[in-house]
Amino acid sequence: SQTIHQWPATLVQPVGSPLSLECTVEGTSNPNLYWYRQAAGRGLQLLFYSVGIGQISSEVPQNLSASRPQDRQFILSSKKLLLSDSGFYLCAWSVSRSGNTIYFGEGSWLTVV
Amino acid sequence: AQTVTQSQPEMSVQEAETVTLSCTYDTSESNYYLFWYKQPPSRQMILVIRQEAYKQQNATENRFSVNFQKAAKSFSLKISDSQLGDTAMYFCAFIPNTNAGKSTFGDGTTLTVKP
């Protein structure tokens, strides 16, 4: 069966520091991969999605970037965090065909102080 | 661009009773999928139910069922025999068949099941 893991689960970082959140999927190949952000009490905002290695699409211009160095690995990064980057980040995957169910990781809480 | 609207920020229901959560959407796409996800206090997003837009039959999963009205662009979730474990935030989501990167989620409905 397929599983998705993301880490770290919680992170407290000072303003201006770098960020790296990592996500891996097991049990499938060539998945679509996604990074979402969820503000407190709100829905999910799609930040990045990827249909293959090195193929990243950004939905929202911001202080963050994403990379997909391997087929089942997706990394969310920032060179310099802002206070507004605080939030709950979710990595997700789906079978590489549009319209399929999106499955989510456990999420990462980021607090920028 | 798609929009998904959940007009009920909060709802409550007594244990064992039935509750319906509303969702409307707007799109120019003809082929798409609709989902309900549950997010309990653990924050894990859990798939509740999935509906293909080309299917007229409403999806059901045990105590969960949907009322899909394509012409009205409405997709409500009915929870029967509510249980305390159903307490969570529920999100309606739209994914077009043409582009998985165009997923759109509503702002959620917080459901509290009271004993």
Image: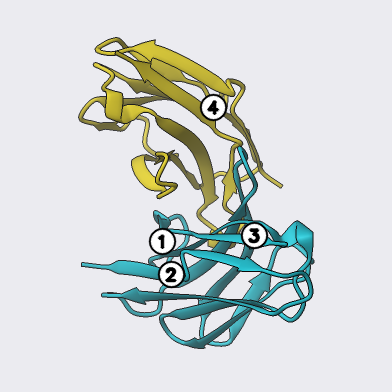
Chain colours: A cyan, B yellow
Residue name at image x 36 percent, y 45 percent: B47
Tag 4–tag 2 contact (CB < 8 Å) = no
* Chain letter of the residue beneath label 3 in the structure image: A
What x and y, as percent, mark residue B7? 62, 22
Mark 1 element type: loop
Tell me which residue sits at (50%, 37%) in the image. B91
Q: Give the residue number, with chain letter if any, for mark 4.
A: B23
Label 4 environment density (alpha carbons within 10 Å; few <14, some 14–19, many ≥20): many
Q: Which residue was labeled with disc 1?
A: A105
Using the rendered image of the protein, determine whether residue B69 is visible from the camera's viewpoint: no
Q: Amino acid at mark 2?
A: Gln
In the image, which disc is placed on residue A6? 2
Whether residue B115 appears in this view of the structure is yes
Q: Where's residue B3, x and y in %? A: 67, 39
* Mark 1 and mark 2: Cα distance apart in space: 6 Å
How far is disc 1 from disc 3 in space, using C-alphas? 18 Å
Chain ID for label 4?
Answer: B
Q: Amino acid at mark 3?
A: Thr
| Residue picked out by circle 3 | A111
Viewer-side label of 4, 3: 3
Q: Amino acid at mark 1?
A: Gly
Query: Mark 3 and 2 residues: CB-CB less than 8 Å, in contact?
Result: no
Q: Chain of mark 2?
A: A
Does dot 2 land on a helix, a strand or a loop?
Answer: strand
The residue carrying pointer 1 sits among few (fewer than 14), some (14 to 19) or many (20 or more) residues within 10 Å by Cα, namely many
Q: Nearer the viewer, mark 4 or mark 1?
A: 1
Residue drawn at the location 50% of the way across and 27% of the way down: B110
Query: Could you say whether the residue bearing mark 4 is in a helix, strand or loop?
Result: loop
Q: Nearer the viewer, residue A15 or A50?
A: A15
